[in-house]
């Protein structure tokens, strides 16, 4: 298995959906190839960073408007079922 | 009654029950809990503050009006995110009605694995993702990196890796084949890796890849 072959399998490996036999090959390659190992680590790190974040605060004026709108909607009768 | 770790805090299901019984305060607590996640998802998908505000408002109005349709066995947060995702996709489709970009997703040729650029900047990160996440600067950097992706790659990444949809669900949501989702996801992950490693990589631990290196 070459570094280039790993690229195609990278998603399945990171997601844990790779075939066990292929997975063993993949890991054998990584054991002897530090760059590939670091690339896999980096990708896992990147996914973790995005997964854990709720990066944006609601702009305050919008937040106030949103809550006021919802309070108004709450008072209205529910729409007829489709 | 199930309680959250936070002492005395009602669970989402408790609040949903109270809201269904007519308690607006309970509904508002649900909004406060989830508004940031909904708004962030919309910002990431649409890259527009105005559109993200519209989607956030639509999502909570829709949740308010359809509270009785919410099935309690699922997570309330997940239900909201699905409403927001569909609303955001509608906005994206509307944007594509403009000439030149019509039905881009449907008519664009499938992407293959050819020409996927190999990782260039390879280095261990100077800190763990958990430690990096504590830094304010990180938030700006990762959102910038995400904004730098092509929309088609960004959407697949946000739905699959951030929202946790399966490959099949992502394909259905975007009207793509599963094979195409996989290729786009790979490109997105590799591009984000490249950008983030340039920002977070420890330069003293940078690894030069031998161009002729291969293991058979």
Image (cartoon, rainbow, N blue to C red):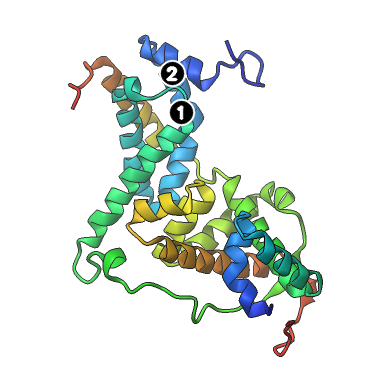
Confirm whether residue A24 shows in the render: yes
Earlier along the polypeptide chain: callout 1 or callout 2? Answer: 2
Figure quadrant of the C terminus of chain B? bottom right
Confirm whether residue B120 shows in the render: no
Give SS at disc 2: helix
x and y percentages locating residue B186 in the rendered image: 53, 66
Dots 1, 2 in contact, CB < 8 A = yes
Looking at the picture, tell me which residue is in the foreground, A24 or B153: A24
Q: Residue at x 41, y 73 (%)?
A: B111
Q: Residue at x 22, y 66 (%)?
A: B102
Figure quadrant of the N terminus of chain B? top right
Q: Residues within 10 Å of mark 2 (few under 14, many from 20)?
A: many
User: Residue B7 occupies which quadrant of the picture?
Assistant: top right
Tell me if B70 is positioned left or right of B102 in this view: right
Tell me if B49 is positioned left or right of A9 in this view: left
Tell me if B123 is positioned left or right of B155 in this view: right
Q: Residue at x 25, y 68 (%)?
A: B101
Instruction: Report the disc number at residue B58.
Output: none
Compared with residue A61, is residue B209 higher up or lower down, i.e. above or below? below
Q: Marks 1 and 2: same chain?
A: yes
Compared with residue B87, is residue B175 higher up or lower down, i.e. above or below? below
x and y percentages locating residue A11 in the rendered image: 58, 62
x and y percentages locating residue B106 in the rendered image: 28, 65
Mark pair 1, 2: CA separation: 8 Å
Q: Chain of mark 1?
A: B
Task: From the image, tell me which residue sits under label 1.
Answer: B76
x and y percentages locating residue A75 in the rendered image: 26, 15
Q: Residue lying furthest front in this view?
A: A21
Instruction: Report the disc number at residue B16.
Output: 2
Give SS at disc 1: helix
């Amino acid at each position: 298995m070459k570094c280039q072959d790993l690229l195609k399998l990278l998603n399945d490996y990171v997601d844990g959906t790779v075939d066990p036999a292929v997975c063993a090959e993949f890991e054998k390659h990584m054991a002897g190839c530090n760059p590939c190992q670091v690339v896999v680590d980096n990708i896992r790190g990147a996914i973790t960073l995005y997964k854990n974040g709720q990066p944006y605060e609601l702009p305050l004026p919008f937040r106030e408007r949103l809550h006021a709108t919802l309070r108004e909607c709450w008072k209205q009768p529910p729409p007829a079922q489709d | 009654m199930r309680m959250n770790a936070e002492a005395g805090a009602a669970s989402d299901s408790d609040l949903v029950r109270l809201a269904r019984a007519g308690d607006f305060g309970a509904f508002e607590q649900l909004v406060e809990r989830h508004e940031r996640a909904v708004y962030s998802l919309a910002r990431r998908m649409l890259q527009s503050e105005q559109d993200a505000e519209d989607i956030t408002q639509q999502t909570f109005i829709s949740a308010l009006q359809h509270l009785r349709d919410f099935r309690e066995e699922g997570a309330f947060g997940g239900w909201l995110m699905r409403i927001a995702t569909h609303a955001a996709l509608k906005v994206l489709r509307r944007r594509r009605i403009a000439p030149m970009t019509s039905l881009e997703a449907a008519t664009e040729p499938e992407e293959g694995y050819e020409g996927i650029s190999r990782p260039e900047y390879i280095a261990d990160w100077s800190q763990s993702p958990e430690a990096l996440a504590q830094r304010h600067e990180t938030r700006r950097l990762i959102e910038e990196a995400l904004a730098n992706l092509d929309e088609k790659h960004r959407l697949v990444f946000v739905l699959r890796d951030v929202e946790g949809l399966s490959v099949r669900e992502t394909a259905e949501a975007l009207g793509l084949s599963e094979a195409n989702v996989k290729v786009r996801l790979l490109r997105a992950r590799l591009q984000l890796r490249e950008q983030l490693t340039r920002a977070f990589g420890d330069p003293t631990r940078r690894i030069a890849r031998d161009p002729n290196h291969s293991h058979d």
